[in-house]
Structures are given as C-alpha cells and as structure tokens.
Image (tube, rainbow, N blue to C red):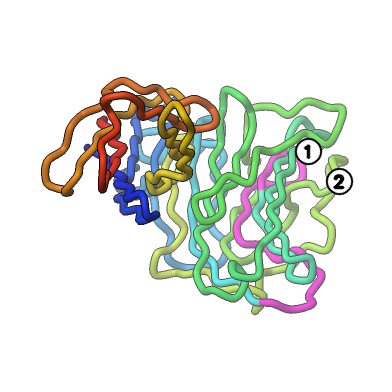
Amino acid sequence: MKDLCSFLLSGVCLGTATLSAIFTGVASSETVSVSSLADLGAPSETRNTSGQFPTYQNRSVGGVSQVNTKDATFAVLVDFNAGDSAVNGVIWETGGATIGVSVSYNQAAATLSLHHSSNGGNALGVVTHNLTEAQISGGDVEVVWAYDASEIEWELFVDGVSSGTTVDTTAVDSQNSWSGGNAAGLGIFGGNFAAGNGDNTNLVAIANLGDTATINLDTGLRFWAGTDTALSKPTEKPELQIETVMVTEDGMTITWNGRDGEVYQVWRSSDLETWVELDDSITAGPEGGSFLVEGEGLIAGRMFLQVRQFE
C-alpha cells in the first residue's frame, strides 16, 4: 500500500489514509487476539432466554470438560437505561459467594462491574467500568468478559475496549475456578452469589436487572468455552501530510507527521504529472519525518513536493 501527501508552496496539502488491521488466532487453550467476536467463529453455546439455568461447574461444553476451570469468553449486548437505582442489577452470574462470578450494572453510579470470588469465598477479584453518557443513551453496548485460567483473572471489554482485568482486593489469593455449584442466571440472580466483600457473603445491594437495562435476547448470551479472548480494534493511521515548510539560505526543510521508525520518500514535480525522486530512505523519528531540499533538488518557478510511504 502507499500513502501520499502532496504539498504546493502556496500551502495546499492533499493526502490519503490507510487502515491497517492484523489479528492472530491460536489454540483454544490460549489467548486469542481478534478485532471482533465474529473472528472467533460460532459460540460453543448461546442462550436466548433470561432467567435461571444450571451452573457451569463441572459442565462439558463444546468438547471442553470442567469449563469452570478453563479459559472462557462470554458476550452480551446490553441497552443501558439512565436512572437513580442504587442496586447492583445482575446481567449474568454463576456459582455463589464461595466460588462464583458476576457481571452487574449499578444505574445510579453508571458502572459495570465484574466480581470473581474463590478460595472459600475469602478471595475477591474486581474490575469496574465507568459507562459514558453515550454508552448509556446510545442503544446496545457490546459487553464481553474473558477468563484466563493461567493468570486466574477476568478481563472486561466494553464496545471492544478493555476496561482492565480483575484485581484482587483481599490478602487471600484467588484460585482457578470461576463457578461453584449454585445456579447461573441471565438478568436475574438466585441463591448465593459472587462475593462482594471477599468474606463469603453476597454482593452488596444485589438485585435482578429489572428495567435498569435490557439484554438483547436475539443475540443472546454467547459462550466460547476454552477460549480467552483479547479484543483489539484496528487503529487508523492519521492522514499523511506535510506540516511545516521552512526556507533558509541552505534550502527548504519540510516536516510531516511520519510514524517513528517507518521509512518515507520525497518526490518533486513542477506540473503534478512528472515526478522526480529526491530521497527514498528517510526514516521518521519520534517527532515525525523531515527532509532538507537543497542544491539540485530546488527548481525555479512552481514546485510541488510529495511524501510517500510504501508498506
């Protein structure tokens, strides 16, 4: 691919931008880096109804046995509602206060939290995301939580962006299991629940999700057993453009918004049809790219300069 930026001495700058996206896949027992959930393929299991359902403890799903001790990825679409309810409404949960995990929404605080309890209920890992106004008012939001069995931690993603991983809030270390024998629930909770205090007690102010948010049941709760996912959205390169022109006794120095370590070329033209290469191996630094046009590189009359990047 090629990026071009042309510059006319009167100050006209034209350019194009490119998108670069790379994602890699690996075995289901390792972390899979993708730009969207579609790259994971079909889920191991999908639930399209809210309510209580069997625990994940010791279940076999999609050929993965004892799924509660293996990598896991879950995803739902949630339409959050603004309001002043201070309870922690359950989006999803499994297990109990001794061993369990939950994802909940606190409407008044506008927070989305994941709690993981283990080790006799005395270990607690928590990660919390502060929802933006746009995420609350803008319709369905993609919520993904992924478990890494080797690290014994969950990572929370909101609209494809990581909110961080669970941080242990107690002196007792977490253990590798994310569900005890208590029932699971989508939009509701039942019986004991993932600890909220790290002392084998329920999450504070626990409640069913109710009307604080709506789970998209058409898409449902998607579960990829044995897969720990890392979402990384493709980044768009800024438009390549010449930023400054400085004329001195030695010639004319141009600078552009080059990316550190990438190689660029500078071309010259008098008519925008015929181009002459002035340099083909200019490596940009942390501050961008720069080039001094001097000597035979300068021409009388109109002169156009163009910076190109080849990949």
Residue 267: x %, y % from top left: 25, 34
Structural distance between the alpha carbons of marks 1 and 2: 7 Å
Mark closer to the chain start, 1 or 2? 1
The residue beneath circle 1 is 124
> In the orientation shown, which residue stands out farthest toward the left?
274
Q: Is residue 169 placed above or below 138 in the rendered structure?
A: above
Residue 168 sits in quarter: top right
Residue 261: x %, y % from top left: 43, 23
Residue 234: x %, y % from top left: 40, 44
Please give left or right for residue 176 compared with residue 14 in the image: right
Which residues fall within the magenta stretch?
A: 82-101
The residue beneath circle 2 is 197
Q: Nearer the viewer, residue 76 or 267?
A: 267
Q: Residue at x 79, y 77 (%)?
A: 84
Mark 1 surroundings within 10 Å by alpha-carbon count, few (fewer than 14), some (14 through 19), many (20 or more):
many
Q: Residue at x 72, y 60 (%)?
A: 111
Do the numbered discs 1 and 2 sit on residues whose CB atoms are within 8 Å?
Answer: yes
User: Where is the N terminus found, in terms of image quarters?
Assistant: top left
The local secondary structure at tag 2 comes to loop
